């Protein structure tokens, strides 16, 4: 007998947003689907009713439920705890997972009933069965499973306004950068999902634009590269026509076949974490692969990636211990002369679970530690620790000059025209151009909405839609 909706237990899944910041997150082109919650929904037995509230698109309003599941980054943990408390007061069990709760389970247990540490695929069935039996536990620890027969996320629950669909083909990172908690959460083993499973899911995605969430889609070994080539070739063989972006390390340009087939399969842009143009910053960040290749290799890598029509988003960080006003100014000049098509700037942020956080905590240099309220400020937009060579006021003043120089409108237009010539694709160059404008909108709050900003775009595009660009 089919169960009526009113008789089915309800699982409410919540994707909180950080209410502290505006700008970048107000642009729907830069929002990415909550893939983890889609997977949790897929793992939930069919006799459950599943509802997803996504604060990327609308603020949370109370929704009746039998069980509430929340995921959070450090920057959204404050909001996650706030929502969890609403249900705890009603006696409704709350479960939290995700990277922040996995790194800070004792803290999370002060605000929720249950914490899932690590990847949830191996334990979610037990969470549900324990809840149904009336003895849900306080703590569950997930295992790092191989990515075989990975559940397809419930994409019907995602908000239809997402411009980019999200999909994952690998997990884990063999590197151990001091500021990154990926290896602590997903492990350092590079786990590859079967290609046919990836393609089956990719065919079901309705969006034309896709973000491969992999931390390094081409990996670091020859085997990883061959697997990436096979994935890209089979996207073409199956005639899956998507524009896509992803992330890779500086070794992306080692194999020309990787770049050739990535471009042919629809790759528009690739993010590369540069972090610093001098060895001091790379040593602090333990960015060993960049040290291995050397800072002098950056521009050669960018040029080679561009040769295949793929734009480069280069990520630079500010707020290293070695930073001074002079070094920051030098970094800005390096960036302005760089061949990278788009520039992401971020502030060094010590996230829980990282070696950087432990180091700064041991040295009593964390300045924003009124937890959990201060977690919402751990979003790479604000300095949360004390620098040895600059005061916070000096650093903040310098960063305003950084943003004005890197995202100056005339400079972005010149970069667009240069990218058009290098990439031999006005469309791909426009993707990188709009990526730069999105970053400008994030960092420079001068009262201009994206609609006003678009007035300044090159005349070639003034009569064309911009809905499907990053």
Image (cartoon, grey):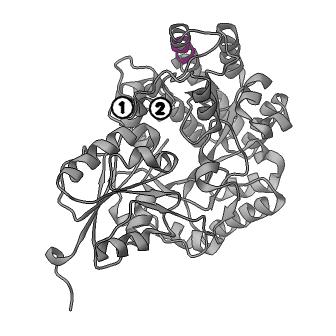
- Magenta span: helix, strand or loop, mainly? helix
**Dividing the image into 4 quarters, which one contains the N terminus?**
bottom left
When the figure is inspected, residue 242 is found, relative to residue 43, above or below; the finding is above
User: In this picture, is 346 found above or below 220?
Assistant: above
Task: Say whether residue 467 is visible.
Answer: no
Residue hosting label 1 = 373
How far from the left and from the top, in percent, is residue 124? Answer: 43, 69
Question: As rendered, which of 199 and 277 lies closer to the eye?
Answer: 277
On residue 114, which mark appears?
Answer: none
Q: Crowding near pointer 1: few (<14 within 10 Å), some, many (20+)?
A: some
- Crowdedness of circle 2 by 10 Å Cα count: few (<14), some, many (20+)? many
Q: Which mark is residue 378?
A: 2
Residue 433 colored in magenta in the image = no
Q: Is residue 400 magenta?
A: yes
Secondary structure at badge 2 equals loop
Nearer to the camera, 21 or 182: 182
In the image, residue 332 sits, relative to residue 31, either above or below, namely above
Q: Where is 431 relative to 346, above or below?
A: below
Residue in the picture at 38% in, 65% down: 137
Q: Position of residue 350 (x, y in %)?
A: 56, 32
Residues rendered magenta in the picture? 399-403
Would you say the residues marked 2 and 1 are in contact, meaning their CB atoms lie under 8 Å apart?
no
In the rendered structure, the answer to whether residue 27 lies left or right of residue 281 reads left
Distance of mark 2 from mark 1, alpha carbons?
10 Å
Choose top left, top right, bottom left or bottom right for residue 398: top right
Q: Which of the 4 image quadrants contains residue 371?
A: top left
Expressed as whole percent of the image width and height from the top left, the position of residue 136 reads: 34, 67
Which element is circle 1 on? helix
In this view, the residue in front, 192 or 24, is 192
280 left or right of 171? right
Instruction: State whether residue 33 appears in this view.
Output: yes
N-terminal label among 2 and 1: 1
């Amino acid at each position: 007998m089919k169960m009526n909706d009113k008789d089915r237990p309800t699982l409410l899944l919540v994707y909180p947003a950080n209410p502290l910041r505006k700008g970048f997150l107000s642009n729907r082109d830069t929002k990415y689907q909550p893939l983890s919650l889609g997977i949790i929904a897929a793992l939930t037995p069919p006799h459950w009713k599943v509802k997803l509230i996504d604060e990327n698109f609308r603020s949370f309003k109370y929704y009746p439920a039998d069980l509430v599941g929340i995921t959070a980054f450090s920057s959204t943990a404050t909001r996650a705890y706030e929502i969890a408390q609403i249900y705890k007061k009603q006696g409704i069990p709350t479960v939290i997972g995700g990277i922040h709760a996995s790194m800070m389970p004792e803290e999370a247990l002060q605000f929720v009933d249950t914490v899932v540490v690590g990847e949830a695929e191996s334990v979610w069935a037990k969470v549900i069965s324990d809840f149904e039996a009336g003895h849900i536990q306080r703590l569950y620890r997930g295992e790092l499973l191989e990515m075989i027969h990975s559940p397809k996320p419930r994409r019907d629950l995602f908000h239809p306004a997402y411009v980019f669909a999200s999909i994952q083909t690998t997990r884990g990172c063999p590197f151990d950068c001091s500021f990154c908690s990926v290896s602590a959460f997903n492990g350092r083993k590079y786990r590859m999902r079967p290609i046919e499973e990836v393609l089956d899911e990719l065919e079901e995605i309705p969006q034309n634009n896709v973000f491969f969430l992999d931390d390094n889609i081409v990996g670091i070994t020859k085997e990883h590269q061959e697997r990436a080539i096979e994935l890209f070739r089979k996207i073409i063989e199956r005639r899956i026509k998507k524009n896509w972006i992803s992330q890779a390390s500086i070794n992306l340009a080692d194999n020309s076949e990787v770049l050739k087939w990535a471009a042919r399969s629809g790759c528009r842009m690739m993010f590369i974490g540069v972090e610093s143009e001098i060895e001091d910053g790379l040593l602090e960040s333990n960015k060993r692969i960049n040290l291995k290749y050397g800072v002098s290799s950056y521009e050669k890598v960018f040029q080679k990636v561009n040769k295949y029509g793929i734009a480069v988003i280069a990520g630079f960080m500010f707020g290293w211990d070695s930073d001074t006003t002079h070094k920051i100014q030098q970094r800005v000049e390096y960036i302005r002369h760089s061949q990278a098509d788009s520039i992401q700037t971020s502030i060094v942020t010590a996230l829980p679970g990282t070696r950087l956080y432990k180091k700064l905590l041991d040295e009593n240099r964390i300045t924003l530690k009124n937890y959990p309220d201060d977690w919402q400020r751990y979003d790479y937009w604000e300095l949360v620790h004390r620098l040895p060579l600059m005061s916070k006021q000096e650093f903040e003043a310098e960063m305003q000059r950084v943003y004005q120089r890197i995202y100056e409108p005339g400079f972005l237009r010149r970069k667009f025209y240069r990218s058009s010539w290098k990439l031999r694709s006005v469309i791909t160059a426009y993707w990188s151009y709009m990526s730069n404008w999105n970053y400008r909108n994030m960092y420079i709050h001068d009262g201009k909405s994206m609609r006003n900003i678009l007035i300044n775009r090159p005349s070639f595009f003034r009569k064309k839609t911009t809905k499907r660009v990053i």
